[in-house]
Image: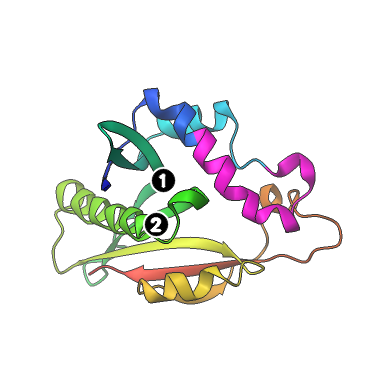
Amino acid sequence: WMITSTCLATPLDCGDILSITNDAFMADAFFKKPEYYNRFSDSDVAKLMAANNSIFILAKTTSNNETIVCGSLHLSLSYNAPSSLADYGEAIGHFSAVSVPSKYGKKGIGKMLVKAAEDYLLEWARKEHQLDSNLRVVMEMGVVDLRTDLFPWYQAQGYVIIKEISPIDPGFAILIAPNMNAKLILMQKSLT
């Protein structure tokens, strides 16, 4: 029997984040150059943890009195102020690197991580930007078009395809194997 919950990561969790994310992202290896199979390096995780409005959310499970990290997700937060009194402000969350090792797959951990990210964004919007009727709260993420298995999963969580992200970010383009034509697709969900 397992109990799973979510929490914010601390710097002590960097090793678990690195291990879980790089393991989970081997699913992307078919379209990447081998030198880019790993999603993160130690310094990537440390930089993301130290950045403003940037967090990792962990899923932890307890089994036989042992706590194990069984998933992680990165979330960055931003705010666009209204440009006029008639406009709406916008709190935007962007999550990435949703990672659940295959041995914990199909147990609802990914859904739990996404829901925790959505709840965190709403709470941040309330605290930092006085969530009211003039604030739009949106969660988004980029999904590689070659990972067709992910689209129905995110759509079942309420996300919709918005557009192809263009131009392709040079940091993404360098990862792609020469014989692959990969694109990033923006998916979004309005939380208010």
Amino acid carrying label 2: it is Gly
Image: 78 above or below 156: above
Residues under labels 2 and 1: Cα distance?
A: 7 Å
Find residue 137 and report its image quarter.
bottom left
Q: Residue furthest top?
A: 12
- Give x and y (percent) for residue 107: 37, 59
Q: What is the magenta range?
A: 18-37
Q: Residue at x 37, y 35 (%)?
A: 52
Image: 38 above or below 175: above
Which quadrant of the rendered structure holds the C terminus? bottom left
According to the image, label 1 marks what residue? Answer: 71
Residue 183 is labelled as none
The mark that comes first in sequence, 2 or 1, is 1
Q: Are marks 2 and 1 in contact (CB under 8 Å)?
A: yes
Instruction: Tell whether 144 sits left or right of 123.
Output: right
Q: Is residue 162 visible?
A: yes
Instruction: Tell whether 175 sits left or right of 184.
Output: right
Q: Nearer the viewer, residue 191 or 101?
A: 101
- Give x and y (percent) for residue 78: 36, 50
Q: Is residue 100 visible?
A: no
Label 1 neighbour load within 10 Å: few <14, some 14-19, many 20+: many
Image: 14 above or below 7: above
Instruction: Tell whether 92 sits left or right of 5.
Output: right
- Mark 2 residue element: helix
Q: Is residue 26 magenta?
A: yes
Q: Residue at x 63, y 69 (%)?
A: 145
Image: 152 above or below 44: below
- Give x and y (percent) for residue 178: 86, 57
According to the image, label 2 marks what residue? Answer: 110
- Mark 1 residue element: strand
Label 2 neighbour load within 10 Å: few <14, some 14-19, many 20+: many
Amino acid carrying label 1: it is Gly
